[in-house]
Amino acid sequence: MTEQINALIGKLLDEHRLSAKEYEALIAGRDAEAAEILAGAASEVSRRIYGNAIYFRGLIEISNICKNNCLYCGIRRGNTDCVRYRLTPEEILECADEGYSLGFRTIVMQGGEDPYYTDEMVCSLIREIKRRHPDCAVTLSLGERSRESYAALREAGADRYLLRHETANKAHYARLHPAEMSFDNRMRCLRDLRELGYQVGCGFMVGSPFQTNAHIAEDLKFIEEFQPEMCGIGPFIPHEKTPFRDHPAGTLELTCFLLSVIRLICPTTLLPATTALGTIDPLGREKGILAGANVVMPNLSPTSVRKKYELYDGKICTGDESAQCVRCMAARMESIGYRMVVDRGDVKK
């Protein structure tokens, strides 16, 4: 590890911020020693704030129908080979009830941008989940909507909203998305969510096509300035039915390095060890936790549809990542010195 990298790590630990050029230099100059130091510091920060708790969220993937045609996504509109599904309100409520019976106190509804799920329908679902389970938090991850829509969902009782910014560089955003999608609108959505009082999550893919260290540095600077309550990053994994089918996947090494950096930038943020990490490495989520992550989101979706929500090739769909195997996942967390917590797990300020 060079003196420059050592100095940058020291500054990050002291100030929780670097310039964009310094973030770029830290990424470019990283080595195994730097990663180990950052992971130890990030883990220490996480334990100081959250103890050894790993928060479990019950994930319901409500639909793989999407009006968008993002170039990297397996459920893009243009993938005519995708076997589509959408859950009925009754099925979604059954999943939420099952999650509650398993001990989950945060329910996450995630899906493609499916116009079937109107404000009226989603508001009704939120109210019914809250009526049945008043001690539950409801998190939504339903993409870009109008400010009026976000306001209605918030009024109905939604607590959190996850919307990955994907990249903080406008030109890079344009290379990952079709022309009808707008970087400015994505940022507008995030601002609206923050102003409406949600706990907001952003994030990006590590190793996405055309991504440079300078782009990642911009992402880190955006996260530093936005201060999200949640931040979801995971390795890019190509899907065979997308234009980026032949692009190499992102790496576990860089993803874990960036998890550590983000923990040090935003000490209190809720930081998932994603399914994508578990897909590229059997112990990927454990390694993410040891790098500073503190959230895992097992799947509550009906087993009949789990394989159909395929954002990338090879997604793990059965076994420990399913909510029904809570004890298996809990044992995996205990094996690395952490304990499973299934309460609401609100961000600590």
Image (spheres, helix red, strand yellow):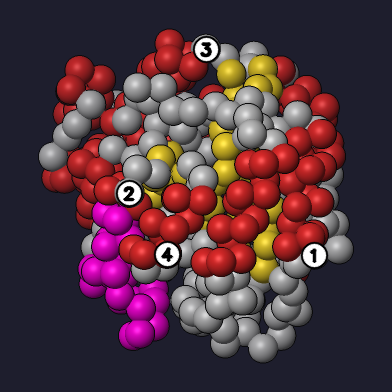
- For the residue marked with disc 3, what is the amino acid? Gly
Q: CA distance from mark 1 to mark 4?
A: 27 Å
**Quick one: quadrant of the N terminus?**
top left
Give me the C-alpha separation between circle 2 and circle 1. 33 Å
Does 208 sit left or right of 316 as displayed? Answer: left
The first of marks 4 and 2 along the sequence is 4
Q: Which residue is mark 1?
A: 305
Distance (Cα) linking label 1 and label 3? 35 Å
Query: Which span is picked out in magenta?
Result: 170-192
Give amino acid for label 4.
Ser
The residue nearer to you, when weighing 328 against 184, is: 184
* Circle number at residue 196: 2
Instruction: Return the residue at label 3.
Output: 51
Say which of 233 and 187 sits in front.
Answer: 187
User: Reading the chain from its start, which is encountered first: label 1 or label 4?
Assistant: 4
Disc 3/disc 2 C-alpha distance (Å): 30 Å
User: Residues at badges 2 and 1 in contact (C-beta under 8 Å)?
Assistant: no
Earlier in the chain: of badge 1 and badge 3, it is 3
* Dot 4: element: helix
